[in-house]
Image: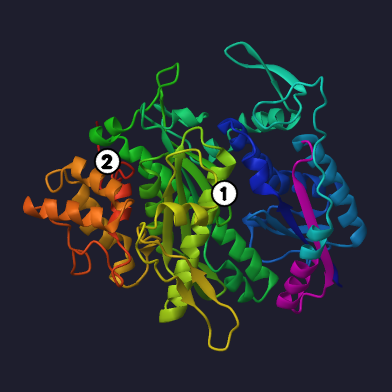
Amino acid sequence: MNKLVVLYDVTGIQEYIFSSVKLKENIGASIAVQNVLDTYLKDSIESVCPNYAANWKEYRGLKIKDQDLEAEVIYIGGGNAMVFFKNEDLYKKVNRQLSIKILEETGGNVIVASSFIETDWSDFKQDRQKLVKQLAENKFKTIHSSPVKGIAITRECENDGLPAQVCKIYEQNKHEYISFPADRKRNFEDNEYFEKIVPLPDHLKYPKELDDLGQKEGENHIAVVHIDGNNMGKVLKEINSYEEMKEFSMETTKAYQSTMQSIIEKMIDALKDKNFFNALNLKQTDDGKNFLPIRVIVQNGDDVTFITNGRIGIPLAEAFLNQIGKRSIPIGIRQIPLSACAGVAIVKSHFPFYRAYEMAEELCASAKRKGKILANKHKEEMGNWLDFHIAYSGVTTDLSILRNRQYNVPGMKSVAPLEFKEPGAKSGLELKEYNLLWRPWCIWGHYDSKYRWKEFRGKILNHFQDTNEWPRSRLKKLRNESIKSKADIYVLLEEMKSREKELPLFENSNEYFRENDRHTPYFDALELLDFYISIENVGGEQ
């Protein structure tokens, strides 16, 4: 007998999570989004369909094919869910219950779209294609309502700009007026969802404020790290059945979650090293615990976002990409290798948080674009790539505009974009390049060594960070001269040669500009002088 298969999708996730300037509300919002499908959807199914199968992670295969069930969850992950229902009436009743629950718990700020078709199980690929197409149409038709704004006599919530509807004592016995959505987010944050995933030793605690990430006065940068899996659309096209779809979602969630766990454990171990511990300015709680300088904001399938101290964001992203590059997941009799890209936005602690996240997303997209272009050019696997940007001010303009303004040297010819186009195609992939940027870098993959992060770190970054090689003052001057003119750069380099200080060799050359004298790999390292503390081979008792 045919069943109804439904595809759910949570929309506007990023806007909801990152709309507040308070870390505790961002974390609470992330937990709320997790609850929408993990908890509210399953609770709604249970209230309408007593005879159902919801614990999809606990068994393989599908029960509804052989048993007279009213509903069965196939998978939940990445802001999506797929569910079988016995008939359309049950589906509509569940949706009604789910809508009420979302309204009560989030103030209606989270939107869930869905699509459905009848299926006889015979053609998963065709079914999924129909569901995705219908879902896109439904999302386009959905009316996105906004919360009622304030009138002249209302107080505004300083965290998200909505009318303050709640007055509570939250901390230090002070009354605080906040919006209803902000209040609900804080309630979720109290549930400590992520603390249950990776519990900490007694002497450490997860931070709840951006200022608790180990910054020092005058060095108050944080890193927003966004990681996203590669080629997931391509992998999904290779899935042949509902059973494989369930297995794929289950294994992907498990792989990314365990990788994030290992990164946090690596951070905990690194803090045992005296030098590493002292390099950070870890604040203490009232009961004498240190704040761990990392906090997961989003952990949703292959979508991961965390924040950390500005000086360890890139090393932690590097460690994540190295680990995920070693993993593969079983689908049927096949092993599907995993890969991902990362964007790291290093910003001041009180930089607009939503813009910092958007920048991390743009950087991740830039890393993916370079990986795809080179993979297509050289017929290779895409690999894991990383891009980063350091914001020294509160400028919030588009990344490409920012880079065009900051990383092209006055008077120098521009760098040709990196591009790939299939023969006969009208359009292709393009990545803008700049005089002073060599990034994005390949963290994991078998690419030409000029793109490999390991080569760059070992031959340039480590050389510059060794104060016995180049005086820090000269390196900072080289960084400053680089944005002025090519002539200023070479005057300084000649001065350093007279002192027997030359640039380290990279790709058998120590010329500052390469690629037809327009492009340099050295400026990336100059920018990272104060923003890269290695966590490799760090650990041990204090």
Residues at circles 2 and 1 in contact by the CB criterion of under 8 Å: no
Q: Which residue is mark 2?
A: 539
Judge whether 440 appears above or below 398 on screen.
below
Where residue 255 appears, x then y in whole percent? 50, 57
Residue 379 numbered mark, or none: none
* Residue 430 visible in the snapshot: yes
For the point 17% across and 58% down, the residue is 504
Q: Secondary structure at mark 2?
A: loop
User: 488 and 133: which one is in front?
Assistant: 488
Q: Give me the C-alpha separation between circle 2 and circle 1.
A: 33 Å
Rate crowding at label 1 as few (under 14), some (14 to 19) or many (20 or more) other CA atoms within 10 Å: many
Total numbered badges shown on the rendered structure: 2
Mark 2: amino acid: Gly
For the point 39% across and 55% down, the residue is 407
Question: Horizontal placement of 401 versus 163: left or right?
Answer: left
For the point 30% across and 55% down, the residue is 485
User: 420 and 381: which one is in front?
Assistant: 420
Question: Horizontal placement of 215 versus 365: left or right?
Answer: left
The answer to whether residue 258 is magenta is no
The answer to whether residue 130 is magenta is yes
Residue 358 numbered mark, or none: 1
Rate crowding at label 2 as few (under 14), some (14 to 19) or many (20 or more) other CA atoms within 10 Å: some
Question: Horizontal placement of 233 versus 542: left or right?
Answer: right
User: 282 and 417: which one is in front?
Assistant: 417
Bounds of the magenta segment = 107-134
For the point 34% across and 63% down, the residue is 412
The N terminus - image quarter: bottom right
Residue extending farthest top: 173
* Residue 541 visible in the snapshot: no
Residue extending farthest right: 89
Give the quadrant of residue 131: bottom right
The C terminus - image quarter: top left
